[in-house]
Amino acid sequence: MSATEPVFQITSGNPTPEETAAVTVLLLAIARARPAGPQPAQQIGGWADPALRLRRPLPPGPGAWRASAWY
């Protein structure tokens, strides 16, 4: 595309210079908008960690019954 070649052409209707300018600004804004890079992975809090649904092995020894409770 050369500098003298039109970027777009209005083929029907009779737009005012203001309407043409509005369409031009809109098209330039769309063309310059760059998609954001890859989105960072959303970090989920510990409450949603599936590993927390699994019980840990019970420790043997004194006080083991206290360690077996969910808290």
Image: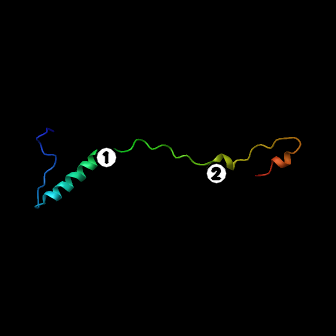
Q: Residue at x 85, y 48 (%)?
A: 65
- State the residue position of label 2: 47
Give the position of the N terminus as an image quadrant.
top left
Q: Residue at x 13, y 51 (%)?
A: 9
Q: Quick check: 35 left or right of 16? A: right
* Sequence-first disc among 2 and 1: 1
Q: Quick check: 58 left or right of 5? A: right
Q: Residue at x 81, y 48 (%)?
A: 68
Local crowd size for mark 2, using a 10 Å CA cut-off: few (<14), some (14–19), many (≥20): few
Element on which disc 2 rests: helix
Residue 11 percent across, percent down from the top left:
11, 56
Q: Residue at x 66, y 46 (%)?
A: 51
Marks 2, 1: nearer the viewer: 1
* Residue reaching furthest to the front: 18
Residue 37 percent across, percent down from the top left:
40, 41
Local crowd size for mark 1, using a 10 Å CA cut-off: few (<14), some (14–19), many (≥20): few
- State the residue position of label 1: 33
Q: Residue 43: which numbered mark, if any?
A: none
Q: Amino acid at mark 1?
A: Ala
| 15 is higher (above) or lower (below) than 67 | below
Residue 24 percent across, percent down from the top left:
20, 52
* Residue reaching furthest to the right: 62
Q: CA distance from mark 2 to mark 1?
A: 37 Å
Element on which disc 1 rests: loop
Q: Amino acid at mark 2?
A: Trp
| 46, 64: nearer the viewer | 46
| 37 is higher (above) or lower (below) than 30 | above
**Tags 2 and 1 touching, CB below 8 Å:** no
